[in-house]
Image (cartoon, rainbow, N blue to C red):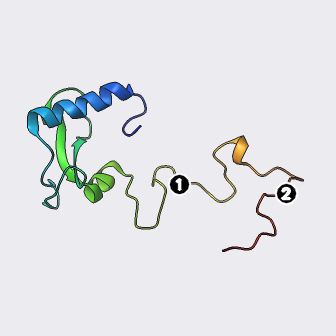
Amino acid sequence: MEGPTHLNKDFYRDLHKWIQYHFGNAKECSFCEKKGSGREIHWALKKGKKYEPNIKNFIQLCVHCHGEYDGTLIEKGERRSIKTEIKKGQHFSKKTEFKKGIIPWNKGKKKT
């Protein structure tokens, strides 16, 4: 699910459908003025506003500006959020942690 994790997935989806139904797809970035289609330009929640059916709570942003605005910009080749940077040796969970005495599945295999 995209969007805030504290929201019901259906509510989040339905709210974006409501915005698109009443106001159409976002067409132009409010920051850099890039024009594009629905996949390139998003309806983004303004900071400090609530998710509710009120167009004044949203702005149109391109993917790049939306990432910068939310603080989750992903540069080309990166696969992490600025807010959730993983440090060397840190693991997401106990399941992904290397345990002493266990041989990794790919040890000794040649890279292709």
**SS for dot 2:** loop
What residue occupies the far left of the structure in this picture? Answer: 23
| Residue 49 visible from this viewpoint | no
Residue at image x 58%, y 54%?
86
Question: Is 29 placed left or right of 103 in the picture?
Answer: left
Q: State the image coordinates of residue 66 (x, y, percent, origin top left).
A: 28, 52
Residue at 38%, 40% (x, y): give it: 2
**How many other residues sit within 10 Å of disc 2, few (<14), some (14-19) or many (≥20)?**
few
**Residue hosting label 2:** 103
The reply to whether callout 1 and callout 2 are in contact (CB within 8 Å) is no
- The residue drawn where x is 40% and y is 59% is 74
Q: Is residue 58 visible?
A: yes
Give the vertical position of 54 relative to 74 (above or below): above
Q: Nearer the viewer, residue 68 or 80?
A: 80
Nearest to the observer: residue 49 or residue 106: 106
Residue 94 position (above or below residue 98): above
Q: Amino acid at mark 1?
A: Glu
Quarter of the image where one finds residue 13:
top left
Location of residue 42 in the rendering, given as x and y in whole percent from the top left corner: 23, 47
The x, y position of residue 38, in whole percent, is 20, 49
Residue for badge 1: 85
